[in-house]
Amino acid sequence: MTSRLSSVSCLKYFGRKKSLKELSTSCKFSSKIENTCSFNQPPLTEPLPNLPNVVYSKHKLANVKTNLTQLPSGIRIASEIAYGEFCTVGVAINSGCRYEVAYPSGINHFLEKLAFSSTSNFPGDNEVLDEIEKYNGLCDAQCSRDVVLYAASANRKYVDNIIKVLADVVLRPRITENEIMGASKAILFEHDTLLIRPEQDQLLENLVHMAAFQNNTLGLSKLCPIENVSKIDRRVLLTYLKNHYKPEQIVVGGVGVDHQQLVDSVQKYFIDEKPIWDNENLDTISIDKSIPQYTGGIIKEDCDIPGFPGPSGLAVLSHVMIGLESIPLVGTNDFVPSCVLNLMMGGGGSFSAGGPGKGMYTRLYRNVLNRYGWLYSATAYNHAYTDSGLFCIHASSEPHYVRDMVKVIVFEMANMANNIQREELARAKKQLQSLLLMNLEARPIVFEDMVRQILACGYRKRPEELLQEIENVTEDDVVRVVKKILDTPLTVVARGNISKLPQLEEIQELINVKPKGKIFGRF
């Protein structure tokens, strides 16, 4: 009560009217201070006098380099310095659905669901998660098409304990019948959920790879097919692990850890302790190292896509994704220009929860979303892998506009190299540089970037080098990349009411002609 009363009294004091005498005195005093300050202060173009020289911190190469060690077994260990109480450590493996050609498709989907379950040294239910929580930790596992990641962020004092848990999760999972049953139910539930959601990104991303690389490597389904759920058992999973989770396929990384301590822990838990499959009589199957064969093609799913729940007023949409083979990560100098092209095309939705202005100057906004009000979204994606890539545009509209939507998107793809303005190229490069730097502010992203680059190239390219490569991209580089992309067969994926979708040959002919000018009337 006292504080409230004192606050009220202060407000009354500062809010009361001043007398004429008080006002004149205060005005004289303030003007005197103003004149004195403006007279005595040096101009902003000169340094302030009588101040010590500023000592700036110096850039030390040892603080930013990536430490890399390869053990005799072939396993690689990478680390970088980061400051703070917490660290991120994890395991990256050259694995993923692209290597499942000799197995039932969907094994890596199962392994993702089974991650951080019971292990040889932590046999109890949730014992692995409880152990990580003891060290203030969080964990995650991701299985992409070409890399599997297991990672944990925890207090840096417990690096050895976390590596012990990760080694057990990767090399010594028990994979019990109950865990397999739980993973099966989770996968079936995920399938059901994807079919009742209005968002189609995950399904289309999987389908466009299946259409682009038919029945080989990158075209193998990332989602376990429903018919394969009952075919995948403990023996199948352990056989895959035995043949793919080998030391030469593994990189262990840490950000914010002591390198030698990390090496010692990896030797202790990854090498000295043997994997669980050494005690099993399992088949030996060689790893599929074939290069992706881009085929192009079309996948159509005429189905009912659910609308958004509630009184949103949004229409039920049809979705189309059109793709072409893009630039691989390694073996070429055109990867960075392809990323600049992706940012230059940009795009998004007609409504953005992030507020107005996001990407409004990209081509898919200026030439597509701002011109054709019946288009609900148009977004460019660039999927890059070590030996291939896929550039695609995802668009959505109401069903009766599907034919026109395809024409608009193909028109933009065919004219990607035309009339590149200096301002839009510079803007795309700045966007790409800022995205790179903002992402690398997060410690887990630094970890993922480090281990992925080492798996793909054998070393990590510093951000400074990437920034310079982005800055060096010219209009000729983008034009060269566009010509390479447009010389590949077309890939088309469509879901929803797609009765008005043109035939693949008609779409391919349209992009081969490379139409110029306007499509619809005044536009």
Image: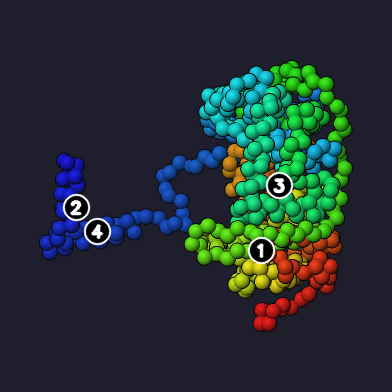
Name the N-terminal-most of marks 3 and 4: 4
Residue 276, image x, y percentages: 74, 21
Name the N-terminal-most of marks 4 and 2: 2
Residue 503, image x, y percentages: 80, 68
Mark whose residue sits in front, 2 or 3: 2
Q: Name the residue beneath numbered marker 2.
A: 11
Question: Which residue occupies the foreground of this view, 332 or 137?
Answer: 137
> How does the figure colour the protein chain or chains?
rainbow
* Number of the label disc, if any, that sits on residue 126: none
Label 2: which secondary element? helix
Question: Which residue occupies the foreground of this view, 471 or 76?
Answer: 76
Mark whose residue sits in front, 3 or 4: 3
Mark whose residue sits in front, 2 or 1: 1
In the displayed orientation, state which residue is furthest to the bottom: 522
Residue 72, image x, y percentages: 81, 23
Dividing the image into 4 quarters, which one contains the C terminus? bottom right
Name the N-terminal-most of marks 1 and 4: 4
Residue at point 63% right, 68% down?
A: 398
Circles 1 and 4 in contact, beta carbons < 8 Å: no
* Number of the label disc, if any, that sits on residue 318: 1
Dividing the image into 4 quarters, which one contains the N terminus? top left
Q: Name the residue beneath numbered marker 3.
A: 465
Left-right relation of 122 to 221? left
Amino acid carrying mark 3 in the image: Glu
Mark whose residue sits in front, 1 or 3: 1
